[in-house]
């Protein structure tokens, strides 16, 4: 009996020991995973708290005197970003390109276009940026190549070429003509006939930009290899282009037409793009890129997506799910819709609709302009540039500034006749000083004209004026990086009417109230949802800093914005 009792005890001791060991292992593993996740999240702070400055390289600074901006020019201007407190730069495409679509038609993904310099110039820029604690994000164009890319030259050479399937080739329709009714984003058929092999190739953009066949695993591998090439050099991430257009219907069915569709001159918006946009398969591809980036553990590499779609529910799907990471964020283009007639209520709805659609646990972002749309100062009116920067830089999430917005640049006047591209006006040279060509180039002519207002709207003049838009911007960047309230995601509207939008940003200890007068008149009134008083920390007019404001009696000039620290 005693022996049995002993055996039972021994058994239960072993059992208890095993359970204890198992529990310890589980707790240890859970702690380790928790710690790793926390460290990984911590590594994301640089882009969550920072401001991303979008450079259009051809227009930023010419260092060679040919009228085109270049990489050495950007390197020479890095001090400017130190002055502003900007730590993240994003460059539009700098790769080898025949420039049919301003560098979005790439003929070599792994080389720099001679217009911008060479790989050594790029290494120098990256090194100098990193030395200053800055990050560099590149463009990634996965949907198409140039028709001059060796892959396409091979692909079009014969039907049996190993790279034939790297692009999308189809026989003419029965009776001739393009295989189906698909229309390119730029208008006209999305198919171009190639006489040599008597087939059509697909291009969702220009005919010179044949679509890659992303259903082909070799193509996906080749694109991953492009990412690896730049990541190995130390690039801090990518902005992926035209992501909605990656994969198309494999049965190539005609898309439904809308009213006004004209078979002779089909326009992109006259079709319902059920077979060429936002295919589920796109998400797996993005997850694949994310996995490539996540192999780099030294620092977090960011992945941003460009998905141009009016349906915001489609856009936010590209964040991925809880367990399938895709983009750190797809660009939020909501504020691009602002115009002269937009009132404060409408601005509020753009913001609140976006925040409501944002999936749980994902990070928001905001921008006022980019290289494809008229500048915000031209759309809304130059007078509101300062207030809009207050809005941009005090909303919760990452802010993205298109070059020149910090000084209030507006579109250049480029006559229709001399336009090489309808987007030339918003791509005009950076305005550095009041000298010829605004200090952008020593050439007689810049590649696109400088905006007329460069004598007064430029960096040098504004650097000499402590009340300038430039100093306001610098103060806002500083506010974001030093005050906890602006680092998190708190946001609460406390007053919305047709003229004024006011909201709070808080942490556990402090609250800031931001109020902006979007109307065309001076506004006097009481903020609805908040009482008490505060001290002005930011005034878009750079006059009221340090003064006291009672929320029951607020006065805002036309286009004035204030950030007030509550007492
Ligand atoms: Ca140049
Ligand atoms: Ca495609």
Image (cartoon, rainbow, N blue to C red):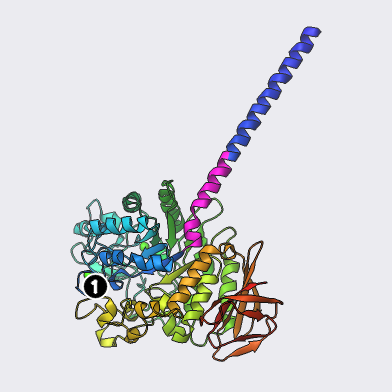
Quarter of the figure with residue 442: bottom left
Q: Position of residue 377 (x, y in %)?
A: 43, 82
Q: Which residue is mark 1?
A: 68
Q: Is the CB of mark 1 within 8 Å of ligand 1? A: yes
- Whether 3 is drawn above or below 380: the answer is above
Quarter of the figure with residue 236: bottom left
Horizontal relation, residue 497 to residue 310: left or right: right
- Whether 6 is drawn above or below 220: the answer is above
Determine if the magenta segment contains residue 86.
no
The magenta span reads 32-50
Q: Position of residue 364 (x, y in %)?
A: 53, 64
Q: How many marks?
A: 1
Horizontal relation, residue 58 to residue 26: left or right: left
* Quadrant location, the N terminus: top right
Report if residue 373 is visible in the image: no
In percent of the image, x 25 and y 87: which residue is there? 417
- Whether 63 is drawn above or below 414: the answer is above
Most foreground residue, 471 or 195: 471
| Disc 1: CA contacts within 10 A as few (<14), some (14-19) or many (>=20) | many
């Amino acid at each position: 009996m005693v022996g049995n009792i002993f055996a039972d005890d021994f058994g239960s001791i072993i059992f208890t020991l095993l359970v204890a060991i198992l529990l310890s292992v589980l707790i240890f593993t859970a702690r380790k995973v928790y710690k790793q996740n926390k460290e990984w999240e911590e590594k994301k702070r640089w882009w969550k708290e920072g401001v991303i400055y979008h450079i259009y390289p051809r227009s930023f600074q010419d260092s060679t005197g040919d009228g085109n901006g270049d990489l050495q020019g950007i390197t020479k201007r890095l001090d400017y970003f130190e002055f502003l407190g900007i730590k993240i730069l994003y460059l539009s495409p700098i790769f080898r390109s025949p420039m049919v679509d301003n560098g979005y038609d790439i003929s070599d993904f792994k080389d720099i276009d001679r217009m911008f310099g060479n790989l050594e110039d790029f290494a120098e820029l990256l090194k100098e940026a990193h030395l200053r604690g800055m990050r560099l994000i590149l463009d990634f164009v996965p949907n198409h190549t140039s028709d001059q890319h060796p892959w396409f030259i091979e692909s079009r050479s014969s039907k049996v070429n190993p790279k034939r399937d790297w692009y999308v080739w189809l026989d003419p329709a029965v009776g001739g003509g393009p295989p189906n009714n698909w229309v390119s984003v730029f208008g006209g058929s999305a198919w171009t006939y190639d006489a040599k092999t008597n087939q059509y190739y697909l291009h969702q953009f220009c005919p010179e930009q044949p679509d890659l066949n992303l259903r082909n695993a070799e193509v996906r591998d080749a694109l991953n290899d492009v990412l690896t090439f730049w990541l190995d050099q130390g690039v801090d991430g990518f902005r992926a282009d035209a992501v909605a257009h990656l994969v198309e219907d494999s049965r190539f069915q005609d898309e439904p037409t809308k009213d006004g569709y004209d078979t002779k001159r089909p326009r992109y918006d006259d079709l319902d793009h059920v077979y060429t946009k936002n295919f589920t398969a796109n998400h797996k591809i993005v997850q694949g890129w994310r996995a490539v980036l996540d192999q780099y553990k030294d620092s977090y590499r960011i992945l941003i997506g460009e998905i141009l779609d009016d349906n915001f529910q489609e856009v936010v799907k590209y964040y991925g799910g809880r367990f399938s990471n895709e983009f750190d964020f797809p660009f939020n283009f909501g504020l691009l819709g602002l115009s002269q007639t937009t009132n404060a209520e409408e601005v509020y709805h753009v913001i609140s609709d976006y925040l409501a659609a944002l999936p749980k646990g994902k990070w928001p972002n905001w921008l006022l302009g980019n290289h494809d749309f008229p500048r915000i100062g031209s759309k809304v009116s130059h007078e509101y540039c300062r207030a809009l920067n207050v809005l941009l830089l005090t909303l919760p999430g990452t802010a993205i500034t298109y070059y020149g917005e910090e000084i209030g640049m507006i579109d250049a006047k480029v006559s229709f006749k001399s336009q090489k591209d309808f987007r030339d006006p918003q791509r005009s040279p950076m305005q550095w000083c009041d000298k010829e060509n605004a200090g952008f180039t020593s050439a007689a002519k810049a590649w696109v004209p400088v905006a007329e207002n460069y004598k007064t709207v430029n960096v040098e003049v504004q650097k000499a004026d402590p009340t300038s838009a430039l100093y306001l911007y610098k103060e806002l960047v500083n506010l974001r990086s030093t005050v906890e309230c602006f680092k998190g995601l708190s946001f609460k509207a406390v007053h919305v009417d047709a003229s004024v939008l006011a909201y709070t940003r808080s942490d556990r200890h402090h609250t800031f109230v931001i109020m902006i007068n979007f109307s065309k008149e001076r506004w006097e009134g009481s903020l609805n949802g908040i009482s008490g008083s505060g001290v002005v920390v930011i005034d878009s007019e750079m006059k009221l800093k340090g003064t006291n404001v009672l929320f029951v009696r607020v006065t805002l000039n036309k286009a004035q914005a204030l950030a007030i620290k509550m007492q």
